[in-house]
């Protein structure tokens, strides 16, 4: 079908799956399922369909947590999935998109929860001790990692703890 458009590829300068129309049109066509499976094509492959999209989402979720590309794309895909869910009368393809995007959405939602937890802990520490220096800031992650009952008890008792008592508690662990 791609030949019907009079396209040509330039694989010496471009990736497989990229085709160019007549030079005067200054346009090209990207055949998503033909793109190589590399990180540089990931953002296009998640826009694909079926297995191509599903594998790309799985690949995205496996990227390192602090990868900025991963963080940005997870957020975009989570929003896309949420928008699809809000529609009435979804097509079969849109239902499949929701299923394929679910792992990315669930992971992004979990990251939002963690960010919110860190923000809340930092806010409570700032409210009690003023601006956070590096020592107090380092406690945010440690407090967030506590079991919920222990974390809640600690945060409720902040008003009765001095800065030194709080720091000492985490030096002992």
Image (tube, rainbow, N blue to C red):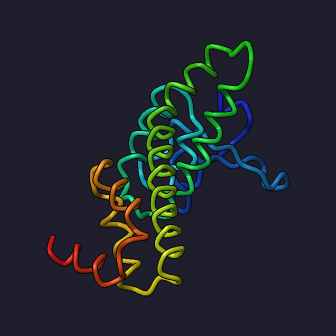
Tell which residue pokes out farthest to the right in this image. 24
What residue do we see at 28% from left, 54% from top? 150
* Total numbered badges shown on the rendered structure: 0
Q: 162 or 99, which lies in front?
A: 162
Left or right: where 169 falls relative to 100? left
Instruction: Locate residue 143, reporting x and y percent.
Output: 33, 63
| Figure check: 75 above or below 31 | below
Instruction: Locate residue 62, reporting x and y percent.
Output: 35, 48
What residue do we see at 52% from left, 84% from top? 131
Left or right: where 96 falls relative to 54? right
Instruction: Locate residue 141, reporting x and y percent.
Output: 35, 66
Left or right: where 105 falls relative to 47? left
**The C terminus, quarter of image:** bottom left
Q: 100 or 157, which lies in front?
A: 157
Instruction: Locate residue 27, reporting x and y percent.
Output: 77, 51
The quarter holding residue 144 reads bottom left
| Figure check: 147 above or below 163 | above
Tell which residue pokes out farthest to the bottom in this image. 133
| Figure check: 170 above or below 97 | below
**The N terminus, quarter of image:** top right
What residue do we see at 34% from left, 73% from top? 139
The quarter holding residue 164 reads bottom left
Tell which residue pokes out farthest to the left in this image. 172
What residue do we see at 57% from left, 35% from top? 48
């Amino acid at each position: 079908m791609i030949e019907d458009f009079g396209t040509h590829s330039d694989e010496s300068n471009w990736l497989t799956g990229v085709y160019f129309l007549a030079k005067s049109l200054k346009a090209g066509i990207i055949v998503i399922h033909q793109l190589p499976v590399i990180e540089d094509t990931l953002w296009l492959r998640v826009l694909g369909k079926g297995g191509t999209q599903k594998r790309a989402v799985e690949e995205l979720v496996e990227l390192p947590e602090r990868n900025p590309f991963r963080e940005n794309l997870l957020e975009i895909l989570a929003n896309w999935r949420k928008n699809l869910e809000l529609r009435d009368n979804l097509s079969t393809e849109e239902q499949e998109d929701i299923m394929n995007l679910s792992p990315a959405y669930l992971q992004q939602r979990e990251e939002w929860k963690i960010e919110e937890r860190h923000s809340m802990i930092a806010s409570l520490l700032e409210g009690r001790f003023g601006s956070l220096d590096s020592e107090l800031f380092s406690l945010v992650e440690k407090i967030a990692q506590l079991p919920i009952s222990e974390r809640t008890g600690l945060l409720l008792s902040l008003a009765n703890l001095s800065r030194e008592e709080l720091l000492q508690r985490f030096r002992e662990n």
